[in-house]
Amino acid sequence: MKTVVRFIKASLFPLIYILFASTLLSFQNTPLPNNKNDKDVIHWKQGRKLLQSDFKAKNKRLYGDAAAITASAFGFSITDSNGYITGSIFVQFYRNDSWWNPKYKDNENRYEILAHEQLHFDICELFGRKLFKEVLDLKNKGRLNEETINKLNSKLEREYSQYQDKYDKETNHSINKEAQAKWNKKVENELRALSSYSEYSNF
């Protein structure tokens, strides 16, 4: 029996609250284990919105005048038992890697900041569902194995980074309120369209 655990990307998404957009940076790290009891990991859940207190990192990991930085990831775990594949998908927010700029703690725009960061996490959930959908397709075709899921991993990693980057650029990190509203609706609709793939705890 062989078990493989992979995270697509653990990414930092900064909200730069200035009039100049900054470059979106990502990092590949060693994520926390898939432990539902770990108080420093938030698993995406409908109706559970991020709070300012969820951003527990003491030091920011990006340059620039960021109001907040979200660290989130989606990934999979599979077990190969003599060619029979089982596994799960998970979408996680990392409190200890997510940072809130103290000078924005009581800022009048703090709710807009939270909403922008929440959508970064919602996009992570969206790609978790995409991953599950494609994993099920591979499994139904009898093609699910470590090689095919790693290829899927690489494909979705690229798409995910591009999607998040486009979100920040078009909304100007939430400063463009009209664009932010459009993205809120866009992601909401896409999540709804993939609602049948939201129960990804086991496959």
Image: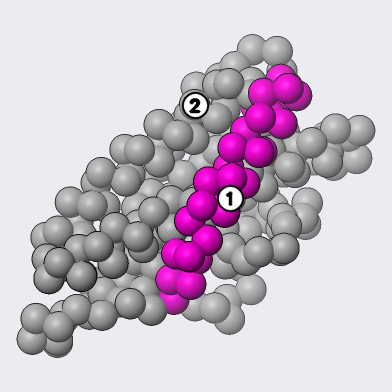
Left or right: 18 as drawn, with respect to 44: right
Which color scheme did the rendering employ for the protein? one colour
Task: Provide the residue designation for mark 1.
Answer: 122
In the figure, residue 197 lies in which quadrant?
bottom left
Residue 36 in view of the camera: yes
The boundaries of the magenta stretch are 173-201
Give the x, y percent position of residue 67: 72, 33
Disc 2 or 1, which lies upstream in sequence? 1
Q: Quadrant of the C terminus?
A: bottom left
Front residue (pair 175, 186): 186
Task: Provide the residue designation for mark 2.
Answer: 166
- Magenta segment's dominant SS is helix
Q: Residue at x 91, y 33 (%)?
A: 108
Is 45 one of the magenta-colored residues? no
Q: Mark 2 falls on what kind of element? A: helix
Give the x, y percent position of residue 76: 34, 66
> Three-letter amino acid code at disc 1?
Asp
Q: How many marks?
A: 2
Q: Mark 1 falls on what kind of element? A: helix
Q: Residues within 10 Å of mark 1 (few under 14, many from 20)?
A: many
Left or right: 17 as drawn, with respect to 75: right
Front residue (pair 37, 190): 190
In the figure, residue 120 lies in which quadrant?
top right
Above or below: residue 41 compared with residue 183: below
Q: CA distance from mark 2 to mark 1?
A: 15 Å
> Three-letter amino acid code at disc 2?
Lys
